[in-house]
Image (cartoon, helix red, strand yellow):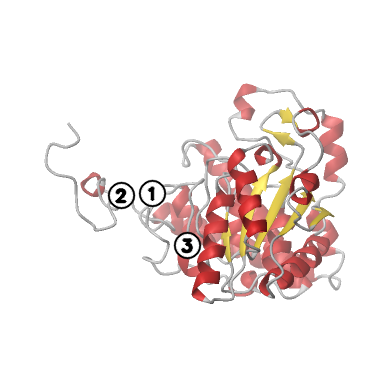
Amino acid sequence: MTDGTTAGSATDPGSATELGTPAGRYRMLRLIRGFEELALGLVKSGEITGGIHPYIGQEAVAVGVSAALRPQDRITSTHRGHGHVLAKGVDPARMLAELLGRVDGLNAGRGGSMHAADFSLGILGANGMVGAGGAIAVGAAWSAVQAGEDRVAVSYFGDGALNQGVLLESLNLAAMWRLPVLFVCENNGYATTLPASVAVAGSARGRAEAFGIPAVEVDGMDTEAVRAAAAEAVARASAGGGPGFLECRTYRFEGHHTMERLMKLDYRSSEEIADWRTLDPLPRAAALLPPGLAAELDASVAEQLAAAREFALASPAPSADGASDHLYASGLRPRAGAAA
């Protein structure tokens, strides 16, 4: 996979990456929501093949955490990672082209929905393996310490990762070596269709506290609450205080994956979804803005996403001649007949 630095920006995100103000944070919430809605439409039309894991409903986590990060800080993401990478500053036009598998995509169309990376922005990659980002973030934090660099690494994961051995090992190493890592559990209540209430003994916070890691439970539907908790943890980690852990109680309004619409799974009641929709992070963030500003920002985002759609659909599909490119770090191609 390419690292996201090989193509120029197609659209200028402008204030979309300015998360230091309530207006900037609201705009990013709207950008992520609109991006996911646009992607859902392209899945339905067949332009995006294979489907996506929508982030709709969980936007406050990505925006709140990213608002607490510095440019040099790094993140690892998940299969539900569009919001994470957009909040860290990725150009939505190139991200959309990536979902479409086009050459102008963030990773030249080779990463797709679950493997977006941009090293220049500190995005070390989304990951389809549940909990795997924890070990990568710990490695990134360890390397920063060894190099004498002030960098904090963030690992996003869901409640489904709480029982994964690799995540528990990552918590242990981060605590033993007092590494600058922030573990962010996006507890949306379900691992695919399995309720966390019947799968997780104890609590998410308890996992971290068992290793002596300071852990905080926060309203993951409240951008400002997430930002405040993340800022405290990042500051502590940067000052040498070791890792932190946030359990963000959140909810996805859509299914685990777009395939659910075809499978017609019935594991959540309409009443449950409706109750969580009353906590939608976008109206809560809009309420903090002066009258009329949210509507102006909505219009700005709509224009940006329209341009992103046009750019992504106009980007060419990759040529079969380059199918073996990027397989090796040296750039060497496999010997003739090796694939036979």
- Kindly report which numbered mark, 3 or 2, lies closer to the viewer in this rendering: 3
- Name the residue carrying label 1: 110
- Name the residue carrying label 3: 118
- Kindly report which numbered mark, 2 or 1, lies closer to the viewer in this rendering: 1
* Position of residue 70 in the picture relative to residue 109 (left or right): right
The mark nearer the N terminus, 2 or 1, is 1
Give coordinates of residue 310: x percent, y percent.
47, 57
Between 62 and 127, the one nearer to me in the picture: 127
Q: Quadrant of the C terminus?
A: top left
Q: Which mark is residue 216?
A: none
- The answer to whether marks 2 and 1 mark residues whose Cβ atoms lie closer than 8 Å is yes
Between 261 and 119, the one nearer to me in the picture: 119
How far is mark 3 from mark 2, CA to CA? 19 Å
- The answer to whether marks 3 and 2 mark residues whose Cβ atoms lie closer than 8 Å is no
Who's the residue at 74% across and 71% down the image?
A: 236
Going by the numbered disc 2, the residue's amino acid type is Pro
Where disc 2 sits, the SS reads: loop
Q: Residues within 10 Å of mark 1 (few under 14, many from 20)?
A: many
> To which quarter of the image does residue 270 belong?
top right
State whether residue 270 is above or below residue 283: above
- Kindly report which numbered mark, 1 or 3, lies closer to the viewer in this rendering: 3
- Name the residue carrying label 2: 318
